[in-house]
Image: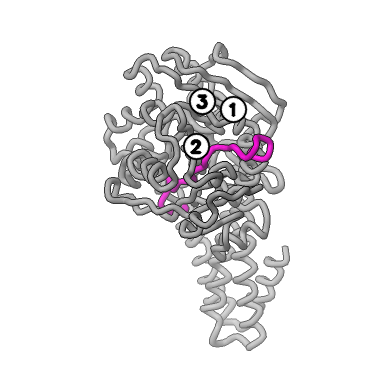
Amino acid sequence: MLAAVVLVVAIGWRTRRWRLLWFPIAVVVAVAGAWAVHLYFDSEGLATDPAPWQLWVWVGLSVGALAVLVLGFTTARWWRRGVTLVAVLLTVLTTSVILNQWVGYYPSLSAAWGAITAGPLPDQVSASALPSLRSTTRTKGAVVPMTTTDSISHFAHRTEYVYLPPAWFRGATPPALPVVMMIAGEFNTPSDWIRTGDAISIADTYATKHGGEAPVLAFVDAGGSFNNDTECVNGPRGNVATHLTDEVRPAVISQFHTASSAAQWGIVGWSMGGTCSVDLTVMHPDLFSSYVDIAGDAAPVAGTAAQSVQRLFGGNASAAASFDPATVMTRHGPYVGVSARYEEADQKGMQRWHGNHAFHGGGKHPPGGQQGGAGAGLGGRGDGGTNDQSQAAATLCADNRKVDITCTIDTRPGRHSWQFAAGALQDTLPWISHQIGVAGS
């Protein structure tokens, strides 16, 4: 409301020429700007559910405020120039708040400030400091930036991170601890699980209850940029699957001396990352043995079926089939020692369904994903009030059982938000720790 009032003052009555020429031009620029951003979102498949209409209104107002500043700068009085500049800042801030409410990206101002200023992550230490921390008793783990190559995938990734639990620091040499690969959602950075998903606090709490034992957590880059929805496949948006399996996994093992067997590696993924967790595990049971899919889809998706094939695979249908979990499982046949858990949001209450629960559904994002309650963004994915991801989980679990993959579906209160993802991680960390052989689990 304040931003709108300031913008009205900035526009003002001014001169006849302003009212008849420059202000109408500013309105046209505002509408065109909002429409252009909307078209960009659609063309790139950045969000397969509609954004809240308020977002497009404020995008237009932000562009309009900037147009008013530029078009009226030379004729406006000094104080109106100042008011217009404030209007630009306030409209952009309001747009950012609405965008954040939609994607649920930052849970607090401090988290947003830390990300914007590239502030240190919780318990962050440099890799060079690790030798001096050996043979120490720690009450908390440490977050370490990881060096990973792109020589195989040629995927331009951002800095990735590893969480090392207190048990890693005991003794002169690191123990070969089990590992969980952590994959974030459609709009993402590698540190999202840390800053927004509360993963470090959750892991430290688990370690405290288990004598310092917890899995190593690898926070990977599945996007390369904030708005690159790759679905962890190999395609025009990047060879992400190759990066994660052939570059990140070996880097974690070699740099931090972790366990290397598939039986001691799992994946936890949220939203897009949930889809990734299924795909990577069923495609590579020689590398991963367990996964937690938090509100993912039945298959990689970036729009309609035709749009997904074009956007993710450059129109190559056979490549798309090679990343379709149902197809992969059918072609593979029975698995040995692989387990799955699905976490789904439902505002009606929490239930637990086991592997014999099977009903069929699509797993594509439904239309009408809307802004959730206060602080609960939907991230461009379906609202927890829909059954889209729940149907995907049921379909995948039924497919799991056909090939001897043990599966469980948990449906709990919540919306498709980072807050839900954090709660799901807290609930499932003991399960996946047990599956991959964390001591004391």
Give residue 143's mark: none
Which residue position holds label 2?
177
> Which region of the structure is painted magenta?
207-226
- Count residues near mark 2 (Cα–Cα under 10 Å), then give few for <14, some for 14-19, many for 20+: many
Which residue position holds label 3?
392
Residue depth check, mark 2 versus mark 1: number of the one nearer the observer = 2
Left or right, residue 114 beside residue 183:
right
Spatial distance from mark 3 to mark 2, Cα to Cα?
Answer: 32 Å
Task: Please name the amino acid that badge 3 sits on.
Answer: Ala
Image height of 12 relative to 362, above or below: below
Spot occupied by residue 379 in the image (x, y as percentages of width and height) = 56, 44
Observer able to see residue 123: yes
- Quadrant position of residue 231: top left
First in sequence, mark 3 or 2: give its number: 2
Mark 1 element type: helix
First in sequence, mark 3 or 1: give its number: 3
Spatial distance from mark 3 to mark 1, Cα to Cα?
Answer: 21 Å
- Quadrant position of residue 12: bottom right
The one nearer the camera, 362 or 43, is 362
Task: Please name the amino acid that badge 1 sits on.
Answer: Trp
The one nearer the camera, 13 or 94, is 94
- Count residues near mark 1 (Cα–Cα under 10 Å), then give few for <14, some for 14-19, many for 20+: some
